[in-house]
Amino acid sequence: MSSIHFADRLINACRTKGAPVCVGLDPVFARLPKQVRDDAGQDAVEAIRVFCAQVISVMAPHVPCVKIQSACFERYHWRGVSVYYELVQIAASAGLIVIADAKRGDIGVSSGHYADGHMSDPHTRDMPVGADAMTINGYLGIDAIQPFIDTAARANKGLFVLVRTSNPGSDAIQSLTLEDGRTVADAMAKTVADAGTADGLVGQSGFSCLGAVVGATKPADMARLRDLMPQQIFLVPGVGAQGASANDARACFRDDGTGAIINSSRGVIYAYEKHDTQDWRGSIEQAAVELKEQIASVVC
Amino acid sequence: MSSIHFADRLINACRTKGAPVCVGLDPVFARLPKQVRDDAGQDAVEAIRVFCAQVISVMAPHVPCVKIQSACFERYHWRGVSVYYELVQIAASAGLIVIADAKRGDIGVSSGHYADGHMSDPHTRDMPVGADAMTINGYLGIDAIQPFIDTAARANKGLFVLVRTSNPGSDAIQSLTLEDGRTVADAMAKTVADAGTADGLVGQSGFSCLGAVVGATKPADMARLRDLMPQQIFLVPGVGAQGASANDARACFRDDGTGAIINSSRGVIYAYEKHDTQDWRGSIEQAAVELKEQIASVVC
């Protein structure tokens, strides 16, 4: 277990690697390089395992953080979940900060189980390494979030609550206007900001272990959410395949260039589809470096 | 794969068994009967597996439906997930309708993975049986729900979207008042009602395969949500350990006594804590029968 607060670890890692970026692993068998699929005998789980391990290996020298999409592994039941945990271990060993993109949320006692399953570190021989942080869904309210906070505080882990998501349909609920003029996303932001300032949750960097997901595809909201959540680190999806540019994400950062980490998933891990399918590792590495340079030019 | 629409199957099963009730499996190792823990050599996953299989066996003659809480199994990583799928199979073989209480929700492509992982039926030898239905979280909007609907429609499965949850803290977001006077939960209800009437989603019973979670602990909202979602089957938690009575849940039903299924989890599966720890199976069976009789007296 790390002895350093999650936010401090994340910010240090971004500084060391040169930019606040995260590569998302959302592996889909049909899109993997033909060579990888063939070498795995068309076994989807094995192909995904090999592919993701290679992606981690080529990006680890360049970026501070990896986000692993749990859905891509759960699709293959317990065998997929086993590979998911193997990849968390591989990524952690490669020095990356690992975010479990699991978007969990339930009534209190069940949220506690999810937190333990996804973020706890080994205390018996057969336990896997847990992720450094996970994404959670706050629609059920603060008592559904609190067990995740308790686990995170105890183990120096982090959380990112879904506040304003990057998908086109997210406006339907998140942009609804309340009677006091705020949006639903603003109310969620206030909940997160308030909960995140409790005793022991804020690191030396001034940031809380309770962060927020804010999509780069929602430029009208980013600056306001930044003001509403001054101590939250934003995990920012939407750059790349979802259409937002590095520049669009600028408003997620504080003036000093801290406070957000920009994620790109498909734009990086499938870079070989546009470039060189033979040297797919090289294409992915190049895309990770380009992502880093783009973000560095905007915020550093 | 069933050739009968999910809502029709569920309603038929409730009629056959005598009441619209569901027993929730939320197994926690520390609360299992000592005998079960000892026989499993204190192995939590094995103890949970044996306990849940026994609970399914004793309740299957009495109730139509079981809800399995994914968090309790994910807590034990892939080994827990493997047991989760084994229990889905055991429950389906015992003639129960199985609801995966997974509360998933993500952007479109990832929701599709979750739907496939949790609800698809075997088409290769090593694939597990999928649940008949699952709970989902709609905070991300309709494009996050649609892939679940597509899978459900294709395979005659069902969904329950979290609209008004039973936990005390759920008011913080779900009860916020919008500028038009509705609550956030009302807006979620409208989204569900509209999406649920699309071509092919409504069964012969008049109910949609897209249902809603509405907690029995929120009596002020139930009747209004019933009006807003006339074609949705409500999955109703909150009766029993969470404090609501069978009578509290009456407003979740239509006047003809259809339209909802009442869940009790801890009140049934831990019934032996109050009664007979030696004959824990008997205590659980008795609690399942009592739950059924209580609900039948209110709605039938």
Image (cartoon, coloured by chain):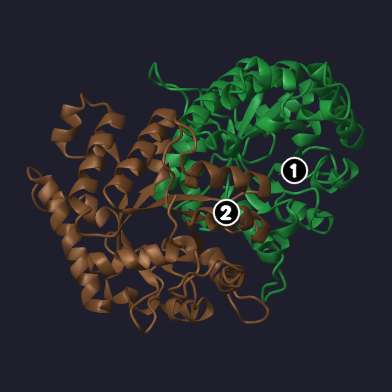
Chain colours: A green, B brown
Left or right for A241, reference B120: right
Q: Position of residue B231 (x, y in %)?
A: 49, 75
Q: Residue at x 75, y 49 (%)?
A: A215
Can you tell which mark lies on residue B148?
2
Label 2: how many Cα within 10 Å (few below 14, some 14–19, many 20+): many
Q: Secondary structure at mark 1?
A: strand
Judge whether residue A103 can be spotted in this image.
Answer: no
Q: Position of residue B56 (x, y in %)?
A: 24, 47
Can you tell which mark lies on residue B225?
none
In front: label 1 or label 2: 2
**Residue A221, quarter of picture:** bottom right
Give me the C-alpha separation between circle 1 and circle 2.
25 Å
Q: Position of residue A122 (x, y in %)?
A: 44, 22
Judge whether residue B272 can be spotted in this image.
Answer: yes
**Residue A54, quarter of picture:** top right
Please tell me whether residue B143 is drawn above or below residue A248 in the rendered image: below
Q: Give the amino acid type for the residue marked by disc 2 in the picture.
A: Phe
Q: Residue at x 53, y 29 (%)?
A: A80
Location of mark 1 (residue): A236
- The number of callouts visible is 2
Please tell me whether residue A57 is drawn above or below residue B150 in the rendered image: above
Left or right for A57, reference B101: right
Label 1: how many Cα within 10 Å (few below 14, some 14–19, many 20+): many
Please tell me whether residue A41 is drawn above or below residue B9 in the rendered image: above
Q: Are marks 1 and 2 on the same chain?
A: no
Q: Residue at x 54, y 39 (%)?
A: A200
Chain hosting mark 2: B
Please tell me whether residue B225 is drawn above or below residue A117 in the rendered image: below
Q: Secondary structure at mark 2?
A: helix
Of the pair B3 and A41, the residue shown nearer to us: B3
Q: Give the amino acid type for the residue marked by disc 1 in the picture.
A: Val
